[in-house]
């Protein structure tokens, strides 16, 4: 795997000793691969860009799971409002105030309408589907890791 690199490094006296030490360390978790081979493997992966590509794939997978999770939490909120009182107002008032401060005016108005419809109808279908989709996409994110 890294024989040509090892031959080049054997010509340097101090590095030769370090290469021999790293080759003598065997890692059981990596099926007996030496520490030197592991360092060479990761260094080549970083240089070729495979590590950054893998990291971006993981970030994309987890980012895709964020939106179904938000839909699930927003559809879950009308079920929790009767049971939760926080501070001076109820949860619904504080949530709507939070949305007004967080979002631009047009987006906030649109989300207020959606939230009002969800709190009136309380459809369990959205809750179930968004939960299943978010679990599926989170599993893809964890598998990417």
Image (tube, helix red, strand yellow):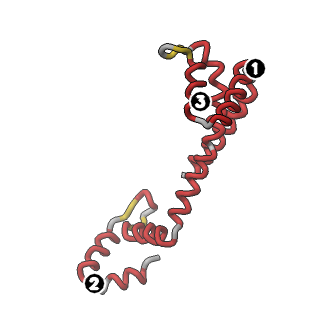
Name the residue carrying label 3: 100
Identify the residue at horizontal 37%, vertical 70% (top origin): 36
Residue 82 - label: none
Mark 2 or 1: in front is: 1
Task: Give the left or right position of residue 122, taking residue 28 as reference.
Answer: right
Which residue is drawn at the image coordinates 55% and 62% (left, top)? 53
Q: Is residue 139 left or right of residue 118?
A: left
On screen, residue 101 above or below 39: above
The reply to whether dot 2 and dot 1 touch (C-beta < 8 Å) is no
Q: Nearer the viewer, residue 60 or 103?
A: 103
Q: Residue furthest left?
A: 14
To which quarter of the image does residue 118 belong?
top right
**Secondary-structure class at tag 1:** helix
**CA separation, marks 3 and 2?**
66 Å
Mark closer to the chain start, 2 or 1: 2
Q: Residues within 10 Å of mark 3 (few under 14, many from 20)?
A: some
Which mark identifies residue 12?
2
Image coords of residue 140 (percent x, y): 62, 47
Mark 2–mark 1 Cα distance, whole angstroms, equals 75 Å
Which percent across, then down, holds residue 131? 67, 33
Mark before the other along the chain sequence, 3 or 1 = 3
Q: Nearer the viewer, mark 3 or mark 1?
A: 3
Residue at the spot x=55%, y=31% of the render? 101
Which element type, helix, strand or loop, lies under badge 2? loop
- Say left or right for 34 vs 119: left
Q: Check the image and report above or below for 47 versus 122.
A: below
Is there CB contact under 8 Å for labels 3 and 1?
A: no
The answer to whether residue 86 is above or below residue 110 is above
Residue 132 location (% of width, % of height): 69, 35
Residue 54: quarter of image:
bottom right
Along the viewing direction, whichever of 54 and 78 lies nearer the viewer: 78
Q: Which residue is mark 1?
A: 121
């Amino acid at each position: 795997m890294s024989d040509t690199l090892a031959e080049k490094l054997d010509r340097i006296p101090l590095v030769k000793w370090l290469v021999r030490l790293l080759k003598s360390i065997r890692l059981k978790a990596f099926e007996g691969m030496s520490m030197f081979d592991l360092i060479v493997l990761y260094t080549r992966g970083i240089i070729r860009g495979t590590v950054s590509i893998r990291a971006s794939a993981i970030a994309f997978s987890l980012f895709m799971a964020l939106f179904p999770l938000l839909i699930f939490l927003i559809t879950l909120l009308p079920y929790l409002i009767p049971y939760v009182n926080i501070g001076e107002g109820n949860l619904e008032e504080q949530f709507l105030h939070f949305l007004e401060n967080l979002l631009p005016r047009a987006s906030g108005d649109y989300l207020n309408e959606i939230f009002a419809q969800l709190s009136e109808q309380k459809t369990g279908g959205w809750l179930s589907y968004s939960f299943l989709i978010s679990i599926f996409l989170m599993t893809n994110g964890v598998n990417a890791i």
